[in-house]
DNA sequence: CTGTTAGCGCATTCAA
DNA sequence: TTGAATGCGCTAACAG
C-alpha cells in the first residue's frame, strides 16, 4: 500500500528515502545501488525506509550518471515473422538473464526504416545493437558505421555483411541448401526448381545475371541460391533460368511460379524452397494442379515447424537453430560489455536436415 | 563523417553544438528540441553546427527533464510464440507510427516473471504498459496496481481480468468456441473432445470442478471451455469429463490424450482444439492410430495459419485478428496519452471461423 | 564508513 | 528573441 503522505509528487526519490531514514543521500544511494560500504544498521534503516515509501530506482537517472542503459536494441525485418520471433526470443532470454532488456524494431526489409531504427537506438543510448540488416553493399552500411563510431557495439545476426568487420552469428545457408538439393539429386532428380530467387522484375537469363541480382539482395537468399547451384554443378546438371523464381516474395507468387514450372515442357520433378511461405505456396500449386507429393513433386524447404511434421506426407525440411541464433548473438554482444575480449568473427551455427517423406524418385514420364 | 576534433569524449551534446554555433545553450536546445522561438538566422547556424558535429539528442536526458520516455512496455507470455509475435507486431507498428518504441518482456506464464517484468518497466519509466497477464484473481494483480498507482497506464490484451477495471482488448473467445463446436454438432457429432483444458494434475470429475479449475487459470482457456460447454448445453449433450484433456499443455500430451479419447469404448468422433499445438498434437494422434480426418475424426482448432490451409484436407480453423489485437491495444493506450478521454472498457474483436474440409459427419460405427 | 558536492544532457523558468 | 541559471534523480569523487 502506498504511504499516505502528500509527497512532492511522482515516485519517491532517493533523497526522500534518505530523509525518511535520516541519513545522507549518498548513504541511501550506496545501499540502494548496491555499491560502496554502508554499516549494517544504516543499511537496515535505508532499506526499511525504501520499503515503506515503495522506492524503485529510476533507471533513466541511473543511466544518465553511469552512461549505461542496460538495454539492448534489436533490429529485424519483422517481429511478427516466426523466424525472427524465435531469434528475438533467444536474444531476450539470454540478455535478460544477464540484466539487459530489449527494444525491438521491425524494418520490413526497408533500408530507410532500418536507418531510422538505428537512430532511435542511438538516441535511447542502448548499450549494444543486434541487427539482421537488409544492407548488403558498402554504400548501405553508413548507419551501422555511425552506431559503431558512437561506441555502440553491433553484432550481425542471420545475415553477414562483407563490407563490415563485425561479429556475425549466422547459419550455414549455402551448405544447408546444397545438402538439401543433393538429397534431391541423389533421389534421381535433374529438373529441380528453386523458390525463391532475388526479387528482381526482369528475369535473369544467365547464371551470371542471376548471381549478380542475388548479391544485390538478402545475404541469406544469395547464399542459398549458391548452395543450389553448387549442388547442380557437382552433379553436372546444367543451370536452367526457367527453374528459378524471381519477383515479389509472396506465397501467391510462389504458387504461380511453381505452377508454371510444373507445366513446363520438361517440367520440374523436385523443388527446393528457401522459406516457409515458399513451401506453403508450393503446396498450393501442387494441389491446384491436382498433383501430389512426393509422387509428382519432391519437396524440401527451409524452416522446419510442427506443421511440417504433421503434413501428410510429412515434409523433409531444414531446421534452423532459431533460438540459439539469438542467444549466441546476445552472448557475443554482451561478453565484451562484461570485459571479455571482442572477437570480430563469423559464428556459423549448423542447421539440420530433417528427413521425412516428401522426397521420392521422379516418376518416369 | 565525424568531425575531426578531439572532443571531450562521447557523442556531442547540445552545449557543444551551442558553442560551435556561437549561441547560448538554450537557443540551441530550442531549435534542436523544436520548441520556443528562435530567429531564422540563429536557427540556421545551430542546425548547421548540429549537422557538422553529428548531433543527436540524448533521449535519456530528455526523458529526465520531461518525464516522458516515449517508450511502451509490453509483457506477454512468449515473444517466440507466433500468436504473441503477431500481437507484438501490431503493437509496435501502431506505436512506432505515433513515435513510441517498445520494450518487450516474456514471462512464460510465470507470475514471478511477470512481476519482475512489470518492475523493470516501472524502473525504466515507460509511458504505458500493455500486458497479456497470467494473473486471474484479486490476489495476483498487485504488480499491476503498483504500476497504476505510479501513474503508468495499463491496458490488458488478449486476456481480461475481472478484478481490474481497465481497458482490455480481447477476442470473443467464448462465442468463437461455441460457434466451432456448434458446427461440429450440426454435422452430427455428439462425442466431441476438448483439447486443452486447465493444466491441473487431478482430472476433474464434475463440470463444476472443471470450471473451478479453469477459472484458476488462463482467462482465454476458461472462456473457450465455457463456449464448448455452451454448445453442448444448447444441444442437450451431456458433459463427459473423459472428453476434456487436462494436464501440461504440450503437443506430446495432446497426442496422448487424443489417442486416449480415440480408444474410448464410446470414442470421440470430433475434436475441438484451443490452440495450434493442440491441433498438431491431435493430427499426430490421428496418424498414430492409422486413422484419417475428417472421416474418422472431425477437427476444428484455434489460430488459423498458412499451414492449416495447405493441409490435406485443409483444416477448418478459427482465425484471430492477431495484428489488430495489438494495434487496438496500442491505440487504446496511446489515445489518452495524447489527450483523449480514457474509456476503461472491454474492446472485443471478432474472430472468423474459416470453413474448410476437416469436418464431416461421423462414421456410423 | 558517511556526508557534501559536482556533474550526466536536456528542458525550462526568469531576466535581460 | 536570447542567454544564464536551475532542476530532473542518480552516481561518483572527495573530504571528513
Image: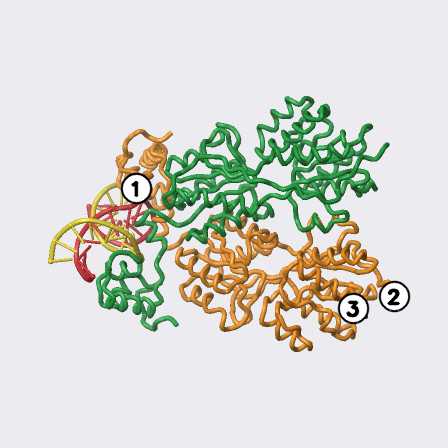
Chain colours: A orange, B green, C yellow, D red
Where residue B42 appears, as percent x and y from the top left, is: 24, 66
In the rendered structure, the residue with mark 3 lies on which chain? A
Return the x and y of residue A280 as percentages of the image width and height. Answer: 70, 55
Q: What separation in Å lies between label 1 and label 3 (alpha carbons)?
A: 80 Å
Mark linked to residue A27 = 1
Circles 3 and 2: CB atoms closer than 8 Å: no
Q: CA distance from mark 2 to mark 1?
A: 85 Å
Q: Quadrant of the N terminus of chain B?
A: bottom left
Q: Residue at horizontal 80%, vertical 64%?
A: A269
* Residue that badge 2 annotates: A365
Question: Could you say where residue B345 lies in the image, as x and y percent from the top left?
Answer: 47, 34
For mark 1, name the chain. Answer: A
Q: Distance between the Cα atoms at labels 3 and 2?
A: 13 Å
Q: Quadrant of residue A213?
A: bottom right
Residue nearest the observer in this picture, A37 or B17: B17
Q: Is residue B12 left or right of residue A140?
A: left
Q: Which residue is mark 3?
A: A264
Amino acid at each position: 500500500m502506498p504511504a499516505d503522505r502528500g509527497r512532492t509528487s511522482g515516485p519517491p526519490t532517493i533523497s526522500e528515502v534518505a530523509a525518511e531514514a535520516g541519513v545522507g543521500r549518498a548513504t541511501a544511494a550506496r545501499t540502494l545501488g548496491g555499491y560502496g560500504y554502508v554499516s549494517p544498521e544504516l543499511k537496515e534503516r535505508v532499506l526499511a525506509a525504501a520499503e515503506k515509501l515503495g522506492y524503485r530506482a529510476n533507471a533513466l537517472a541511473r543511466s544518465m550518471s553511469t552512461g549505461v542503459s542496460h538495454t539492448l536494441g534489436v533490429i529485424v525485418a519483422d517481429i511478427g515473422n516466426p523466424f525472427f520471433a524465435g531469434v528475438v526470443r533467444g536474444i531476450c532470454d539470454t540478455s535478460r538473464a544477464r540484466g539487459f532488456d530489449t527494444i525491438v524494431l521491425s524494418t520490413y526489409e526497408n533500408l530507410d526504416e532500418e536507418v531510422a531504427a538505428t537512430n532511435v537506438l542511438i538516441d535511447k543510448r542502448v548499450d549494444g545493437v543486434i541487427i539482421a540488416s537488409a544492407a548488403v553493399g558498402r554504400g548501405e552500411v553508413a548507419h551501422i558505421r555511425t552506431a559503431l563510431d558512437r561506441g555502440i557495439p553491433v553484432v550481425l545476426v542471420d545475415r553477414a555483411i562483407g563490407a563490415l568487420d563485425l561479429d556475425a552469428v549466422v547459419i550455414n545457408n549455402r551448405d544447408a541448401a546444397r545438402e538439401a538439393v543433393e538429397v534431391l539429386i541423389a533421389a534421381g532428380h535433374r529438373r529441380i526448381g528453386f523458390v525463391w530467387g532475388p526479387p528482381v522484375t526482369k528475369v535473369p537469363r544467365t547464371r551470371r545475371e542471376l548471381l549478380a541480382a542475388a548479391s544485390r539482395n538478402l545475404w541469406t537468399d544469395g547464399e542459398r541460391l549458391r548452395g543450389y547451384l553448387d549442388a547442380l554443378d557437382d552433379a553436372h546438371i546444367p543451370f536452367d533460368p526457367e527453374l528459378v523464381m524471381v519477383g515479389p516474395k509472396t506465397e501467391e507468387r510462389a504458387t504461380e511460379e511453381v505452377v508454371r514450372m510444373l507445366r513446363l515442357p520438361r517440367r520440374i520433378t523436385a523443388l527446393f524452397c528457401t522459406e516457409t511461405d515458399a513451401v506453403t505456396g508450393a503446396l498450393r500449386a501442387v494441389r491446384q494442379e491436382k498433383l501430389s507429393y512426393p509422387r509428382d513433386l519432391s519437396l524440401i524447404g527451409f524452416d522446419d515447424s510442427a506443421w511440417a511434421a504433421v503434413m501428410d506426407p510429412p515434409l523433409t525440411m531444414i531446421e534452423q537453430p532459431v533460438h540459439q541464433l539469438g542467444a549466441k548473438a546476445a552472448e557475443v554482444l554482451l561478453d565484451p560489455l562484461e570485459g571479455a575480449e571482442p572477437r570480430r568473427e563469423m559464428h556459423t551455427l549448423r542447421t539440420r536436415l530433417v528427413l521425412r517423406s516428401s522426397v521420392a524418385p521422379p516418376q518416369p514420364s
